[in-house]
Amino acid sequence: MGRPLLNPRLAEFGTTIFAEMSALAQRTGAINLGQGFPDTDGPDEVREAAVRALRDGRGNQYPPGLGVPELRRAIAEHQDRFYGLGLDPDTEVLVTAGATEAIAATMLALLEPGDEVIAFEPYYDSYAACIAMAGAQRVPLTLRAPSFRPDLDELRSKITPHTRLLLLNTPHNPTGTVLTPEEQRSIAAIAVEHDLLVVTDEVYEHLTFDGAAHLPVATLPGMRERTVSISSAGKTFSFTGWKVGWAMADAPLLAAVRTAKQYLTYVSAGPFQYAVAEALRLPDTYFDGFRTDLQRKRDLLADGLRAAGFEIYQPQGTYFITTDITPFGESDAYAFCRALPERCGVVAVPNSVFYDDPDAGRSLVRFTFCKQDDVLREAAKRLRDLTS
Ligand SMILES: *Cc1c(COP(=O)(O)O)cnc(C)c1O
C-alpha cells in the first residue's frame, strides 16, 4: 500500500495528550492531575434522576434528534436565568454528545476547505483536529504569559478574506483566562465589522473565581445571528462521563449545525438527558457552592505548587493552573511531564502541545485541581521532592 492509511489532514494528530498522560498515570500509579475530570461524582439527586429515567424507560430508545424536549426547555430556561438570553427550545437548542460533538458538528457544518479559523492558543486539542477534518486552516492568536490576555490588534491583523470564523473559549482551558466584557465587546465589534461567524466554547461557564463573571458573547449587539454557543453538563455538574452537551444559535445557524450532527451520532445519552434537565434547574446554592469549593481547591493547589517551587499563573476560571518550570532550571514541558511520574509520582500535562508557536508554551505545565483535598495535598507534598 503506497498511500498512508491515515488521511494526511490528520497526520499531525496522534494520540491525544490526555490519553497519553492518563495511561502514564495508570502504568506508574501516579496521582493524575493531568486530565480534567473530577474524582468525586456530581450531586446525588442528579445521579438518582438518571437512575429513575432508566427505570421508567425514559430515553432508553432513540431520543428525538434535537434532544429530549425536557432538556431543551431546561437549557433555554438556564440561559434566561443566568444571562437573560431568550431561546426557542424547539429551534435554537440542539443536544449533542458532549461539547466535543457540538464543536465537531459546528466546524463540519460551517467550514469549507480553504476557510480560516482564528482560535486562541493554547487551544483545546479537539479544535485543531475538527478544523482539519473540515479541511479548513487554523490561525492561532497566541495568549502569552504572564497575563494570557488576547491582543486584539493582533486579532485584527490576522483577519484575511478567507477568515470564516472566530473560535472563542471562555473561561479558557488551559490558561484560566476569563474574557472581560470589554474584550468581548471588542471581539464582537470585529466579528460584525468583518462579517465573521463566532463559535464560543463555554463549558466552564459556571467555574469562575474571584468575582470574575462569564458573559456569553451571544448577548452582545449584532452577535445573536452569527454566534453558535456551546456548553455541556460534564464540567458544571461533575459528570464528565455522561457526555451531554448542547449547541445554541439562531434557527438558521442551528439548522446547519444539526445537519452535520445528525450524521455523527444522530442522538446519544437518552436517560442522562432527563437527569441533566433536572441538574440545570438546581437552585443557585448548587452553582455558588460548587464555584466556592473549586476556588478553595484552586488556592490549595496553588499554594502547594508555589511551595514546591513552580511559578504559577493564577486562573480566573476552569479546573486548571498553568505553571512555569523554569525555576527548576528546566524548559521542556513535554520532557518534564513524561519524567514527572517517575521523579515524584504525579502526572501533569504539557501546555506546549496546545501551541503552534513552539516558544510560547515551551516551559508551561498544567495541573488540574478538580480532585479531593487530600489528593491535592499529597500531590503537593510529592512535588516538593523535585527540589530536595
Ligand atoms: C472538557 C472540555 C470540552 C469537552 O466537553 P464534553 O462535554 O466532555 O465533550 C470542550 N471544551 C473544553 C474547553 C473542555 O475543557
Image: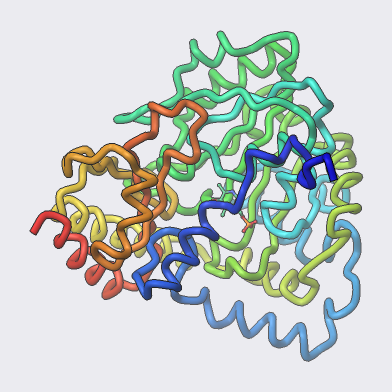
Q: Is residue 141 above or below residue 38?
A: above
Farthest residue to the left: give it.
Answer: 388
Residue drawn at the location 59% of the way across and 29% of the way down: 119
Between 294 and 81, the residue placed more toward the observer is 294
Q: Where the C terminus falls, by quadrant?
A: bottom left
Q: How many marks?
A: 0
Q: In the visual, does 84 lie left or right of 93?
A: left
Residue 254 in which image quadrant: top right
Q: Is residue 329 above or below residue 66?
A: above
Residue drawn at the location 57% of the way across and 21% of the way down: 187
Q: Residue 263 placed where, x, y %?
A: 90, 52
Residue drawn at the location 47% of the way across and 26% of the way down: 357
Q: Residue 363 placed where, x, y %?
A: 32, 37
Q: Residue 86 placed where, x, y %?
A: 73, 44
Q: In the visual, does 46 lie left or right of 381?
A: right
User: Please, which colouring scheme is shown?
Assistant: rainbow
Q: Residue 324 placed where, x, y %?
A: 27, 40
Between 185 and 160, the residue placed more toward the observer is 160
Q: Is residue 104 above or below residue 36?
A: above
Residue 288 in which image quadrant: bottom left
Farthest residue to the front: give it.
Answer: 1
Residue drawn at the location 57% of the way across and 52% of the way down: 16
Between 19 and 239, the residue placed more toward the observer is 19
Between 371 and 295, the residue placed more toward the observer is 371
Residue 78 in which image quadrant: bottom right
